[in-house]
Each structure stands twice: as structure tokens, then as C-alpha cells.
Image (spheres, rainbow, N blue to C red):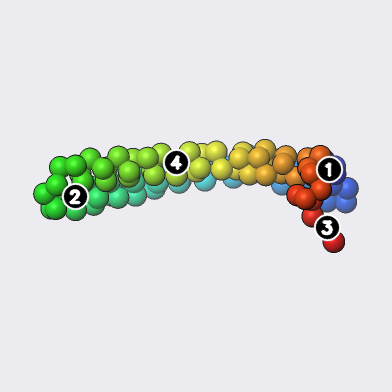
Amino acid sequence: MPPDGFGFFQDALTQFANIIAQWQVQIFGLGTPIFWGLAFIELGLVGALAILRHDATAVVDDLVRGVIAIGVAFWLFQHGADFAKNGVVATLAYGDRWPAACRRTP
């Protein structure tokens, strides 16, 4: 069954999809400053601990690792809903095209 044809539940899914945009604006508005505040605290602590160890390569390694992790987390924060909707749900629509070994059997 394609993602836009869920029969009895289609009305509930349509209403939910229409209200998601309102939720996302509020969640992003509140969550973005909190996210960046926590990110800077984390980078500050990582940098301070690395400096206390007196190892210049460890400072760079830890900060680069932290920046990459924060970047991935922020990308998921911004695009996680689209990824779940278009990636996971759309993948389920291709169930009939999957090889027999990948299909769910009762």
C-alpha cells in the first residue's frame, strides 16, 4: 500500500500531516538556541579538558571530533522528520519490489 493510501486511517494521517508544520516551527524556535547552548558548553568542556592534558594534538582531535558530532546532531535535528517521512515510509512503499529474502512473512 503506498504511503498516501492508508484507508480508514487516511483522515487521521492527513490531519496529523497538516498540523506538523505548526509544531516544527515552535520546536525549532525553542530547540535551536538550547541546542547551540549545549553544543558550546560541550566544546568548552572538551577544549578545557584537552588543554589540561597538555597535548596539542589531543586538543585538535577532540575539538574536530566534537564539531563533527555536533554537525551531525544538528543535521538530524533539522532534517530528522523529513528523513523519517521520506526515507523510512517511502522505503516501506517499495515492499513488493524487494527480493523474497527481504520480505516480511507471516
What secondary structure is marked by label 3?
A: loop
List x then y, in percent, for residue 34. Answer: 39, 48
Q: Which residue is mark 2?
A: 50
Pick whichever of labels 1 and 3 is earlier in the sequence: 1
What secondary structure is marked by label 1?
A: helix
List x then y, in percent, for residue 84. Answer: 63, 44
Q: Which residue is mark 3?
A: 105
Q: Identify residue type, mark 4.
A: Val
Pick whichever of labels 2 and 4 is earlier in the sequence: 2
What secondary structure is marked by label 2?
A: helix
**How many C-alpha atoms fall within 10 Å of the one at disc 2: few (<14), some, or many (≥20)?**
some
Q: Hey, which quadrant is residue 14 in on the image?
A: top right
Q: Is residue 27 visible?
A: yes
Separation of residues labelled 1 and 3 (CA atoms): 12 Å
Marks 3 and 2: which is nearer the front? 3
For image coordinates 26% across by 43% down, the residue present is 61
Q: Which residue is mark 4?
A: 72
Marks 1 and 4: which is nearer the front? 1
**How many C-alpha atoms fall within 10 Å of the one at disc 1: few (<14), some, or many (≥20)?**
few
Pick whichever of labels 3 and 4 is earlier in the sequence: 4
Pick whichever of labels 3 and 2 is earlier in the sequence: 2
For image coordinates 66% across by 40% down, the residue present is 87
Q: Which residue is mark 1?
A: 96
Separation of residues labelled 2 and 4 (CA atoms): 22 Å
For image coordinates 61% across by 38% down, the residue present is 82
Pick whichever of labels 1 and 4 is earlier in the sequence: 4
Q: Identify residue type, mark 1.
A: Asp
Image vertical order of residue 7 relative to residue 79, above or below: below
**How many C-alpha atoms fall within 10 Å of the one at disc 4: few (<14), some, or many (≥20)?**
few
Marks 2 and 4 close (CB-CB < 8 Å) = no
Q: Identify residue type, mark 2.
A: Ala
Q: Is residue 33 visible?
A: no
